[in-house]
Image (cartoon, rainbow, N blue to C red):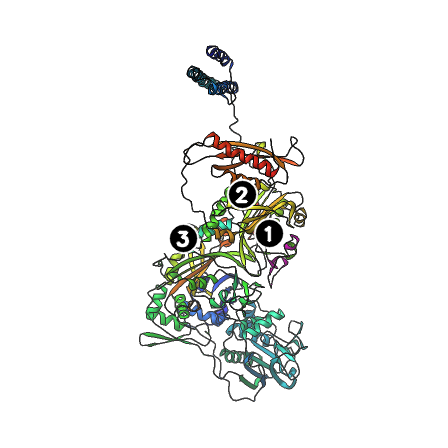
């Protein structure tokens, strides 16, 4: 909100420099966001927090300044309404939407330009002077915070004011010249026939005060803040009035606002009051709360040593009345401080008066607590460290994604979790997989000339029932970082599989994870697998399908991707390492080189070898896959070495031979392998 | 098998004289000591030799082996010496070294870790909470009234998920990490000092300083007599460790529904562009939050604070556009 220092000086004289005042206001919770000096005045832009609607006007700010600087506050006096006037015809039909409506009819006004001081005042805070009547309603609003509206009384059908909901099909042309369709959710001010204003937001053009207006009806009312906010949002229409109604206007201020404006009208536009009515719905007037608290309680809560006198003076300056009962202070808040409900609210007021800067500093006595840290963190950190050491960069991508693009990856058939109110298409779906996010990252990088990418992310994916943590890895381009040509080659499936295996190395995976060749719509045919942990499928891995890549704008790159459920990994827990004594007895290493049909999985051969090698086979080390000219087209060569070792003795040649021969003959028999 | 061991030794010595390089020497070694070398043949023969022949043959083979090994070692030293004397350069030592480059942790993760480290050293426990929250934890429990504007679809993302505990309540993407406060207070009893990092979501139009997803860290300390001055002290220690000892800071009154009094913390440092930069929000836990957690009124007091991770990182590293974090250009990722 903008405030003019010249205007403020009508009520309180700060007596300090602008710079000091800006600091004081900011440190009292009225943050000054901008200072503009012009025309011998200084205009401050303040951020008023939502709990302080009483500060959305000059008097409210002046009151704060008076309290912070301990300076006297002078408020404009309003005269009591003289005698009983004839009743103004006001009917409140919607008693929830409107709880008070004061109508004052003033006859014989002279519509002209407002006095120079008033025009200057409202212009200083960015309002355009129009005529004396309109300017007075604006000036009074900005001065004391009570929204007002002046109708041309002669244009009100039947001289009547009815506060009601609009009827479906009704329309109104508002002061800004726009015709607006109304409905039953909207509170309007109507005359005998039609809506003449959208309550609390904007008046209608048909009844506006013009140069020829003679008689006016001045509205000062109290409307429901939620209703006003909803209507304002619905119509996309807001005003200085609606801004204040939305944040709550003081019930008792309705009368002050009405009287203050009436007085200004009589002084500056002439005329006389002919009719008046204060229509009230609630019988008990909104009052401030009363709170009891002790000086000790305040100081304990804040860590301060404030004196009773200091506290009392500060609160009184803010409009509170303070009395003493037993050892406590009884503090009654003024009607405009509806935010003061209990002790802590008052303690905050006292803290503001003392100044947060003047509150000492201390440290909490015990910070150690018995609450165990999130058990996932150390596991996640270990996995991250391993992936980093594999040369992968970590990403953070959005949890939401465009549903169409997710569909293009063939994942839309899974159950989806939708965002009910997305701002853009990019936010309509909670992602069911990190794949689309990663393809976007890959596309962005490739388009910018960064073709060698190895990335991973541990993040959430979502189903309509749950959020689940997953690990995704993507690789594309070349294994670089080495200028020696021999080591540069495109990344492949095995680079990805290796990184994933490394990542999980620290986990207690039992018999480990296995890879089973499977078809998947977003992977190239024959180049993907599901990842199994015991009997459970925990993820998938493969070469991303070319058509899917093109959807994301990736044209000439091979992209490998895998994704596994971290939830399943967490359940395994970290490996509990014990010490494994280093073998004292020599190992015997035998190489095996065989040729098998291409579709024979090494994994099956390995399983058989392990089975037959018990108990002396200690390790299988895979050395080479050969697919070349020296072998038949439908065959491939596999080379691996077997290590035989016993922890307790030296193995004899014969027993190794016996086992090794058995392994070789079984491989040849079961897998139709031949030795090479 | 009959070998003339003297002749073999003599021949080997002659051959060695022709050796001029490491490569020649290696060929010589393989010829005699390699897996299929002469000595290997001899040992194989020894295995099948008759009982009578074995001792003499074995002795001769061993002598030959020792001699050849000696010759090789001697020659190797000789070659080394020659090399040392000459000035031949075998390597271009100025070529770049080859290392296996390690990956880079995302700056957001690094910043979260850095902040968690500071608080963990002060005894805090790090907790996590769900991203998909109920209206209860995100709003009700935090003393945010039923009709509060922040509950509108303009300020909070709602998702199409059933609420398992209260069918009448909507599920949403948490708009702050604060919902974890009441979750933790329900689960544990004070004293407690906890930190909750995580993703939060708000339907803000994306620009250089706004993102519909970002990261926050929530802090909460609850005990019998936690004071506002403790809040000031704790955050002063934290901010000085995170930035530097010579930053200035100030606590400015503000408003949050779940703390009272509430404050925003500004910092400034020498050479900073603005006088003050808002860095975090904090306050004393509102009694209604304790009530929502099921604590008796007045039994405990507490302090709470929250900060934006991206904001801290942008401020520390001079990053101008929040979108940079989510683009994941590898040239950005690899800088940290």
* Tag in front: 1 or 2: 2
For residue A110, say whether it is visible: no
Q: Quadrant of residue A228?
A: bottom right
Depth check: give the residue in front, B174 or B75.
B75
- Residue A577 lies, in percent from the top left, at 42, 44
Report the chain holding disc 1. A
In the picture of the structure, the residue carrying the numbered disc 3 is: B120
Depth check: give the residue in front, A146 or A183.
A183
Q: In what quadrant of the picture does the C terminus of chain A appear?
A: top right
What residue span does the magenta drawing correspond to?
A: A406-434
Q: How many marks?
A: 3
Q: Is residue A62 magenta?
A: no
Which residue is found at the position 66% from the left and 53% from the top? A408
Q: Is residue B295 above or below residue A103?
A: above
In the picture of the structure, the residue carrying the numbered disc 1 is: A437
* Label 2: few (<14), some (14–19) or many (≥20) C-alpha neighbours in 10 Å: some
* Label 3: few (<14), some (14–19) or many (≥20) C-alpha neighbours in 10 Å: some
In the picture of the structure, the residue carrying the numbered disc 2 is: A499
- Residue A130 lies, in percent from the top left, at 61, 72
The answer to which of marks 1 and 2 sits earlier in the sequence is 1
Q: Give SS at disc 1.
A: helix
Q: Give SS at disc 3.
A: helix
Report the chain holding disc 3. B
């Amino acid at each position: 909100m903008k405030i003019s220092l010249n205007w403020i000086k009508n009520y309180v004289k700060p007596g300090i420099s602008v710079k000091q005042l800006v600091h004081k206001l900011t440190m009292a919770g009225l943050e000054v966001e901008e200072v503009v000096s012009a025309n011998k005045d200084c205009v401050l832009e303040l951020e008023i927090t939502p709990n302080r609607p009483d500060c959305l006007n000059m008097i409210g700010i002046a009151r704060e300044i008076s309290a912070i600087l301990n300076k006297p506050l002078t408020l404009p006096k309003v005269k009591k309404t003289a005698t009983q006037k004839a009743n103004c015809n006001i009917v409140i039909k919607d008693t929830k939407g409107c709880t008070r409506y004061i109508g004052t009819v003033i006859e014989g006004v002279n519509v002209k330009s407002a006095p120079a001081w008033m025009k200057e005042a409202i212009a200083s805070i960015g309002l355009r002077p129009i005529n004396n009547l309109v300017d007075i309603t604006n000036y009074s609003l900005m001065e004391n915070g009570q929204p007002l509206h002046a109708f041309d009384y002669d244009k009100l059908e039947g001289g009547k004011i009815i506060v009601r909901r609009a009827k479906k099909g009704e329309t109104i042309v508002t002061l800004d010249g726009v015709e607006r369709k109304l409905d039953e959710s909207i509170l309007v001010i109507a005359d005998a026939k039609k809506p003449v204003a959208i309550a609390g937001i904007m008046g209608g053009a048909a009844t506006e005060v013009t140069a020829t207006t003679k008689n006016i009806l001045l509205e000062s009312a109290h409307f429901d803040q939620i209703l006003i906010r909803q209507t304002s949002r619905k119509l996309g229409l807001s005003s200085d009035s609606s801004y204040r109604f939305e944040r709550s206007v003081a019930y008792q201020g309705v009368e002050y606002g009405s009287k203050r404006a009436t007085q200004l009208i009589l002084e500056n536009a002439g005329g006389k009051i002919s009719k008046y009515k204060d229509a009230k719905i609630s019988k008990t007037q909104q009052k401030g709360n009363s709170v009891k608290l002790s000086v000790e309680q305040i100081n304990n809560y804040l860590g301060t040593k404030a004196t009773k006198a200091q506290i009392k003076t500060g609160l009184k300056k803010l409009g509170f009345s303070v009395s003493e009962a037993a050892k406590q202070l009884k503090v009654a808040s003024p009607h405009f401080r509806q935010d003061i409900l209990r002790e802590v609210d008052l303690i905050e007021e006292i803290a503001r008066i003392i100044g947060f800067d003047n509150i000492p500093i201390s440290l909490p006595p015990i910070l150690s607590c018995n609450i165990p840290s999130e058990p996932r963190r150390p596991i996640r950190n270990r996995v991250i460290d391993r992936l980093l050491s594999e040369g992968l960069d970590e990403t953070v991508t959005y949890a939401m994604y465009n549903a169409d693009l997710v569909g293009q990856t063939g994942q839309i058939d899974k159950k989806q979790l939708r965002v009910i109110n997305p701002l853009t298409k990019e936010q309509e779906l909670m992602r069911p997989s990190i794949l689309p996010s990663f393809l976007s990252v890959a596309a962005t990088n490739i388009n910018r000339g960064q073709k060698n990418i190895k990335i991973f992310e541990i993040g959430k994916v979502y189903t309509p029932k749950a959020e689940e943590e997953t690990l995704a890895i993507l690789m594309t381009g070349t294994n670089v970082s080495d200028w020696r040509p021999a080591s540069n080659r495109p990344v492949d499936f095995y680079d990805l599989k290796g990184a994933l295996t490394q990542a999980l190395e620290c986990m207690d995976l039992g018999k480990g994870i296995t890879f089973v060749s499977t078809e998947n719509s977003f992977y190239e045919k024959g180049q993907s697998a599901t990842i199994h942990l015991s009997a459970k499928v925990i993820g998938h891995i493969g070469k991303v399908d070319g058509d899917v890549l093109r959807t994301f704008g990736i044209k000439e790159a091979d992209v490998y991707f895998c994704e596994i459920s971290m939830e399943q990994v967490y359940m395994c827990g970290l490996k509990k390492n014990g010490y494994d004594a280093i073998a004292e007895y020599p190992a015997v290493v035998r190489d095996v080189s065989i040729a098998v049909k291409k579709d024979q999985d090494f994994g099956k051969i390995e399983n058989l070898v392990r089975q037959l090698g018990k108990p002396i086979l200690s390790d299988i080390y895979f050395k080479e896959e050969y697919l070349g000219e020296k072998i038949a087209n439908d065959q491939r060569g596999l080379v691996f070495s077997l290590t035989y070792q016993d922890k307790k003795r030296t193995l004899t040649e014969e027993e190794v031979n016996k086992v090794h021969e058995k392994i070789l003959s079984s491989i040849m028999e079961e897998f139709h392998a031949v030795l090479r | 098998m009959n070998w003339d061991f003297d002749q073999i030794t003599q021949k080997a010595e002659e051959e060695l004289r022709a050796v001029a390089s490491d490569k020649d020497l290696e060929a010589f070694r393989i010829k005699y000591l390699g897996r299929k070398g002469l000595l290997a043949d001899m040992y194989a023969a020894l295995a099948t030799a008759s009982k009578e022949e074995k001792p003499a043959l074995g002795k001769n083979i061993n002598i030959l082996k020792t001699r050849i090994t000696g010759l090789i070692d001697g020659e190797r030293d000789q070659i080394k010496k020659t090399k040392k004397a000459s000035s031949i350069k075998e390597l271009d030592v100025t070529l770049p070294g080859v290392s296996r480059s390690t990956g880079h942790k995302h700056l957001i993760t690094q910043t979260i870790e850095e902040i968690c480290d500071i608080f963990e050293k002060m005894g805090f426990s790090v907790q996590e909470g769900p991203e998909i929250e109920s209206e209860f934890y995100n709003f009700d429990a935090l003393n945010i009234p039923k009709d509060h504007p922040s509950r509108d679809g303009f300020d909070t993302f709602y998702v199409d998920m059933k609420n398992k505990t209260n069918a009448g309540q909507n599920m949403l993407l948490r708009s702050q990490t604060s919902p974890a406060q009441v979750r933790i207070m329900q689960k544990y009893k004070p004293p407690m000092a906890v930190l909750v990092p995580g993703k939060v979501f708000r339907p803000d139009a994306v620009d250089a300083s706004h993102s519909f997803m970002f990261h926050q860290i929530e802090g909460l300390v609850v005990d019998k007599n936690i004071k506002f001055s403790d809040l000031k002290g704790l955050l002063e220690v934290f901010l000085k460790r995170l930035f530097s000892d010579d930053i200035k800071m100030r606590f400015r009154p503000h408003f949050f529904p779940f703390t009272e009094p509430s404050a925003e913390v500004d910092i400034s440092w020498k050479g900073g562009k603005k006088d003050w930069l808002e860095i975090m929000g904090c306050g004393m836990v509102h009694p209604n939050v304790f009530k929502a957690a099921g604590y008796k009124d007045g039994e405990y007091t507490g302090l709470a604070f929250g900060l934006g991770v991206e904001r801290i990182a942008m401020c520390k590293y001079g990053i101008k556009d929040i979108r940079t974090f989510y683009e994941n250009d590898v040239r950005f990722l690899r800088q940290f």
